[in-house]
């Protein structure tokens, strides 16, 4: 019963972050699965991909209805990350748990610091095919290896590399995230992993509901305040993960 309560609360927090900020929420999924629900790092990154796919798909539908998705740019960006996502997905299950945890802690730290600093990408960026391909490949690798959406990386990359306007960057990044996550999850299908669906499903349910609440929250609270709160939370979680892996 305690694990179920943790799953419901953690899912709500992840959804709240995704709904209010559009990025940075899914990166909370892996530590929640490991430290609150008892998943191993390999199991947590696989389960996180499932959660990322469902919650991102829900959010993508909302953005698409508002006309805030650049489909061609998103598909081109995603294409560059599909092979890296598949390769990283197969490699992830073979990495020692300590190294996987430390790698995730580094990524969470970078995400938290970016949210705390909040450097807005330039709006007058020029399209660069090599830069777009490199950024897409890097995002695919991160998604496949660590089981996170990487919206905090995708949004500025889409703006800087493909000149996607900020008004459509979040929605377009969701398309990229879903494509990479599906490929990474398929690559892990051959690797045996025992997933506790009795905890994953409630996690997904409250994450989806939390995303809608997050949208309403973003209209009432200053975005800068939300970013500082979640950024500080990510840095704290990253430090705890690194300490647990090394001690």
Image (tube, rainbow, N blue to C red):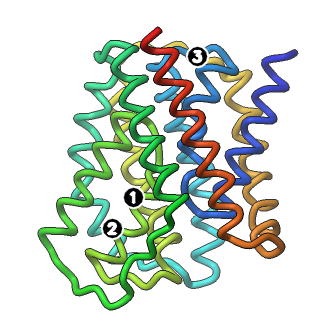
Q: Answer above or below: position of 39 versus 16.
A: above
Which circle's residue, 3 or 1, is located before the other in the chain?
Answer: 3
Q: Image point 47% across, 41% down: which residue?
A: 108
Question: Percent from the top left, x then y, of residue 216?
Answer: 81, 69
Residue marked by disc 2: 157
Please tell me how crowded label 2 is: few (under 14), some (14-19), or many (20+) other residues with Cα within 10 Å.
many
Residue marked by disc 1: 153
The span from disc 2 to disc 3 (Cα, nearest Å) is: 31 Å
Q: Are marks 3 and 1 in contact (CB under 8 Å)?
A: no
Viewer-nearest of discs 3 and 1: 1
Q: Answer above or below: position of 96 versus 130.
A: above
Q: Which mark is residue 143?
A: none
Who is closer to the viewer here, 242 or 152?
242
Q: Classify residue 12 by image quadrant.
A: top right
Question: Percent from the top left, x then y, of residue 172?
Answer: 45, 71
Residue marked by disc 3: 39
At mark 3, the secondary structure is loop
The extreme left residue here reads 130
The extreme bottom residue here reads 124
The span from disc 1 to disc 2 (Cα, nearest Å) is: 6 Å
Question: Percent from the top left, x then y, of residue 1?
Answer: 87, 15
At mark 1, the secondary structure is helix
Q: Image point 64% across, 18% down: which residue?
A: 196
Q: Are marks 1 and 2 in contact (CB under 8 Å)?
A: yes
At mark 2, the secondary structure is helix
Q: Image point 29% across, 16% down: which residue?
A: 94
Please tell me how crowded label 1 is: few (under 14), some (14-19), or many (20+) other residues with Cα within 10 Å.
many
Which circle's residue, 2 or 3, is located before the other in the chain?
Answer: 3
């Amino acid at each position: 019963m305690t694990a179920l309560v943790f799953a419901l609360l953690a899912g709500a927090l992840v959804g709240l972050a995704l709904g209010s900020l559009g990025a940075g929420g899914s990166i909370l999924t892996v530590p929640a699965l490991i430290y609150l629900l008892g998943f191993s790092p390999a199991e947590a990154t696989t389960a996180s991909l499932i959660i990322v796919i469902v919650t991102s798909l829900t959010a993508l539908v909302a953005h698409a209805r508002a006309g805030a998705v650049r489909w061609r740019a998103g598909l081109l960006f995603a294409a560059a990350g599909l092979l890296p996502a598949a390769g990283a997905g197969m490699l992830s299950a073979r990495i020692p748990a300590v190294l996987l945890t430390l790698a995730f802690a580094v990524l969470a730290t970078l995400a938290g610091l970016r949210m705390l600093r909040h450097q807005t990408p330039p709006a007058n960026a020029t399209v660069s095919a090599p830069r777009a391909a490199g950024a897409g490949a890097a995002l695919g690798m991160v998604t496949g290896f660590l089981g996170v959406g990487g919206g905090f990386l995708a949004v500025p990359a889409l703006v800087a590399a493909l000149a996607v306007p900020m008004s459509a960057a979040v929605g377009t990044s969701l398309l990229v995230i879903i494509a990479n996550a599906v490929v990474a999850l398929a690559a892990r299908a051959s690797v045996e992993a025992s997933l506790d669906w009795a905890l994953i499903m409630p996690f997904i349910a409250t994450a989806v509901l939390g995303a809608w609440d997050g949208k309403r929250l973003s209209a009432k609270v200053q975005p800068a305040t939300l970013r500082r709160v979640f950024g500080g939370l990510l840095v704290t979680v990253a430090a705890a993960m690194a300490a647990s892996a090394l001690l």
